[in-house]
């Protein structure tokens, strides 16, 4: 069991070629792992698929069994009001403390008027980021809650 403050993001390294993304999604389906949120980043040669899934350990095992290079990293999940300026507020709190956000992505939630944002900061700053966000009244989400969204 990981740290209850941070969700596990599963990152998959993919060759940038036809059908690779579909194949990963099929593997997740066969493993009965639900994708909650994801984003991709690519170059001409390869891509990285970053995912929040219902069962990170099962996802990693299934992907490795199919010979994919996989990495798990800790990410922060915050819940913010879905209205103008709220993401800027959260990012400003981190910037004021000198904490750099490496990347982020958001997803739709069943909670009316709310958005969930996944933030990646470097490992040395993640505990401080969590402290700053919670001290400033932002809602951080436990991994189990994120995986069940």
Image (cartoon, rainbow, N blue to C red):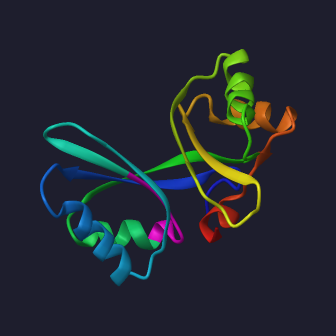
**Picture quadrant where residue 54 is located:** bottom right
Question: Is residue 113 positioned above or below 35 on the image?
Answer: above
> From the image, which quarter does the N terminus lie in?
bottom right
Residue drawn at the location 73% of the way across and 31% of the way down: 85
Question: Is residue 46 positioned above or below 22 on the image?
Answer: above
Please provide the residue range marked out in magenta.
50-57
**Picture quadrant where residue 109 is located:** bottom right
**Picture quadrant where residue 4 is located:** bottom right
- The front one of 68 and 2 is 68
Q: Position of residue 47 (x, y in %)?
A: 25, 45
Q: Position of residue 12 (x, y in %)?
A: 32, 54
| Residue 59 magenta-highlighted | no
- The front one of 97 and 38 is 38
Q: Residue furthest front?
A: 84
Question: Is residue 19 positioned above or below 97 on the image?
Answer: below
What number of labels is visible?
Answer: 0
> From the image, which quarter does the C terminus lie in?
bottom right
Residue drawn at the location 43% of the way across and 82% of the way down: 32
Q: Is residue 133 left or right of residue 51?
A: right
| Residue 54 magenta-highlighted | yes
- The front one of 79 and 75 is 79
- The front one of 11 and 39 is 39
Residue drawn at the location 34% of the way across and 83% of the way down: 30
Q: Position of residue 60 (x, y in %)?
A: 38, 65
Question: Is residue 47 positioned above or below 141 on the image?
Answer: above
Residue drawn at the location 22% of the way across and 52% of the way down: 14
């Amino acid at each position: 069991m990981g740290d209850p403050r941070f969700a596990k993001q599963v990152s998959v390294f993919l060759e940038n070629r036809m059908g690779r993304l579909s194949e990963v999604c099929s593997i997740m389906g066969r493993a009965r792992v639900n994708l909650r949120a994801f984003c991709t980043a690519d170059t001409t040669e390869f891509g990285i698929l970053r995912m929040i899934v219902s069962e990170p350990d099962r996802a990693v095992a299934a992907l490795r069994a199919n010979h994919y290079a996989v990495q798990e990293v800790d990410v922060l999940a915050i819940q913010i009001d879905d209205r103008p300026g709220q993401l800027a507020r959260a990012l400003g709190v981190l910037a004021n403390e000198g904490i750099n956000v490496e990347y982020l992505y958001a997803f739709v939630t069943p909670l009316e008027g709310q958005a969930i944002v996944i933030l990646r900061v470097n490992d040395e700053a993640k505990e401080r980021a969590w402290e700053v966000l919670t001290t400033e009244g932002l809602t951080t989400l436990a991994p189990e809650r994120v995986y069940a969204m």
